[in-house]
Amino acid sequence: MEADDEYTGQMIDEIYANGGDPPSRPVISGEQLDVEAYAALYSGRTKIVRLLFIAERCGGGAMELEALRMAYDEIKKGENTQLFREVVQRIDGCLGPEYGPDPAWAEAVDRRAEQRKDKLENELNAYRTNLIKESIRMGYNDFGDFYYAHGLLGDAFKNYVRTRDYCTTGKHITHMCLNAILVSIEMGQFTHVSSYVSKAEQNSQNSDSLDTITAAKLRCAAGIAYLEAKKYKLAARKFLETNPELGNNYSENKVIDNINFRNFLELVPEVRELIHDFYSSLKANLLLDIHLHDHVETLYEQIRSKALIQYTHPFLSVDLHMMANAFKTTVAGLEKELEALITDNQVQARIDSHNKILYARHADQRNATFQRVLQTGNEFDRDVRAMLLRANLIKHDYNQKSLRKV
Amino acid sequence: MVKMNSLEALVAQIQGLSGNSSDIHQLHGHLKQSDQFLYSESTRLAPVLTQLDPAKHSLGYLYLLEAVTSAPFSKERANELVVVVARFINACTAKQIRLAPDKFISVCRRFKDQVMLLEAPMRAVAPLLTAIQKLQPSTEHLTTLHPDFLLVCLSTKCYKTGLHLLEDNISEVDQPRDFFLYCYYGGMICIGQKHFGKALELLHNVVTAPMSTLSAIAVEAYKKYILVSLIHLGQFTTSFPKYTSSAAQRSLKNYCQPYLELANSYSTGKISELQTFVQMNRDKFVVDTNLGLVKQVVSSVYKRNIQRLTQTYLTLSLQDIANTVQLSSPKEAEMHVLQMIQDGEIYAAINQKDGMVRFLEDPEQYKTCEMIEHVDSSIQRMMALSKKLTAMDEKMSCDPSYVSKAGRERQRFDFDDFDGVPQRFNL
């Protein structure tokens, strides 16, 4: 499935293991997120995992149950019994008898899985004895798909990677890379993601070029990898590159992210719109997104700083009261924020605390130059003299051992 | 060989041969031969000295004086000896005494000891300074008397005189031990006069000087170095520069643990923590006689914080300053700011009516004649220094041991490459 391929979710365990310190994040309660609409954007495994994430994060109430219910439905369409069991546990009978454990279904699925696995193994062995490269590759691929469908990601990854030895055309390599990337993202191993993305891109240079969708997928994956590595600027660039190729496969969320990143990068002049965005439901949505939730706080902070800097940039003097209003904070709080920015040298200004005005200040270049010159001269003087002294000391080849204690 | 009246003969010789340099040379030879004799006659020599003129017969006088002072003396005698020696130092001819520097140094040293015995170190300050000036071939030479002089200055708190001597930049050192002591005492004098920049430089030289084993002086110097660095620069880097000796790099830190922890605590910027730390380790600082300096470190935290405020604010209320810098009241903040303005550390104006402080820019515009002269003289100084450096480099390039080593370690070039030094260059 298209959407399934490029936008995979993660197993529940990995959600928590990934990204550092999860459970301390603020839990959104009673948010106005339309779970149905949100979930409709995805399908397959992504959908399940995102729903479970939302259920986890929204701290009880109707929304959690709603999300769990939809997750249940979705899982039943697939074959992942482990996830199924977990969802059932979470539902804990709250949704009525229809959403119970249903062991019959689980057993049936497991049995089918066993059979399929045996069949696949036999096939693979047959291919291996016949030494037909293409069939072996297909065999491993099928195995990978099988494990993936059942949520055994580590095995899936291993099998996908094994197909590498049997790839004959560029398309095969690309396919392998895409699969590996999928599973890596899901497992939270983003170093793998980066390496396979670069492999795929290299490959595309060597042989036929990728079609736009695949290229976009790769860039998206690369962006996610950067995001996890907290390299926001690089992530933003990658996402922007995918922007022109945005198809309807991509989540609306990604578009919103792009807007934020673009603001961050390109200094959008409409500060007010940006500030307005803060107070829409944007933030809530982002917090519920599996990939972004760790970074939302940091990104928001950075966006706010940028907004502050932008605001003060064109003025010689700014009245702090008006500015505090615009940024919906108190004058004292604003002063503190500005102080931090000035100390960081991101804003060239001085605060007149008495009258509550911010004055732009441009350093006097001439004086600064003189000062630096004199200082450099002094340092040179000091260092060279010390050096000459040391050389002299070594020259005289002294003996320290007889030095008396002072 | 030596007869009873040879003392008179010696005196006659001294009086006779103190004319020109060749005579002096001859005299010197005689004197060296008579060394032992003089020591044996040391008790009888004192009245003989009156026959000689310290200015004209400096060399002879020196020999006799040295023999006289070599004998153990009592407190009563010390007084008259001190007078004699002081007079000699003031009157002697530099050229003559430079012929026998060791004797001169030992005379001065004993002079210092006598003065200490009399518990009047002040009497030694001026004579020792004169002695140094006469002994050193140039102001750039370090003599063994330098550290003694500085020690005397420290004991008498005559910091300014000591400072005066420190202004000469030393580049020639005969005895490394003198150097270490000189820098250490010099650093202490500068600290006393609050010339923290120069103190830092001197202490830095001790710590980074080439040494094969760690000396106690280096350890003490390092402790003070940490403290002065915190006061003057507001920070302390624990990494040593590349040219520090490996002995120092390995072991210095082990002896200075409390100071390193102090530096850590300082860098957090929390004054209360710093103060608690100081309280807890008070004894260690007292033992090292560094408590005063440590207290200065603590007060420097306030200064740093206030200085940082000048970068951010144009005007600020005293109350806000007190809050930011963690002082207890606006009154205290006012005191601190006032002190800093007086010391020239910040430029500001206090408005007592509003309780506001207005921070001003550094009024230096670099447009005055004095400034131009200052820049010009700095340039001249740099050029002279550069020349010196180049000269030293050239001299070293011609040094035989260097050339042979360079020849040995050079890569083998092709036969066609032009070779300045033959491959096998053995001297």
Image: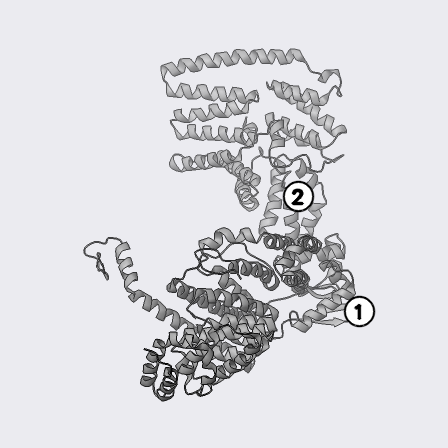
**Which amino acid does the dot numbered 2 rest on?**
Glu
| Rendering quarter of residue A18 | top right
| Residue placed most toward the observer, B380 or B194 | B194
| Rendering quarter of residue A53 | top right
Above or below, A198 against B114 in this view is above
How busy is the neighbourhood of tag 1: few (under 14 within 10 Å), some, or many (20 plus)? few
Residue B153 left/right relative to B338 = left
How busy is the neighbourhood of tag 2: few (under 14 within 10 Å), some, or many (20 plus)? some
Residue A61 left/right relative to B50 = right
Q: Secondary structure at mark 2?
A: helix
The label shown at residue B132 is: none
| Residue placed most toward the observer, A304 or B312 | B312
Q: Quadrant of the N terminus of chain A?
A: top right
Q: Secondary structure at mark 1?
A: loop
Residue furthest to the front: B4
Asked if one can make out residue A92 in the rendered structure from this viewpoint, the answer is yes
Disc 1: which residue = B354
The image's colour scheme reads one colour
The location of residue A90, given as percent across then percent down, is 70, 23
The location of residue B52, given as percent across then percent down, is 43, 87
From the image, state whether disc 2 or disc 1 is nearer to you.
Answer: 1
Above or below, B168 against A273 in this view is below
Q: CA distance from mark 2 to mark 1?
A: 40 Å
Number of labels in the image equals 2
Residue found 40% across the figure and 71% down from its top: B386
Name the chain letter of the residue that bears numbered label 1.
B
| Residue placed most toward the observer, A307 or B388 | B388
| Rendering quarter of residue A123 | top left
Disc 2: which residue = A297
**Which amino acid does the dot numbered 1 rest on?**
Asp
Residue found 55% across the figure and 14% down from its top: A113
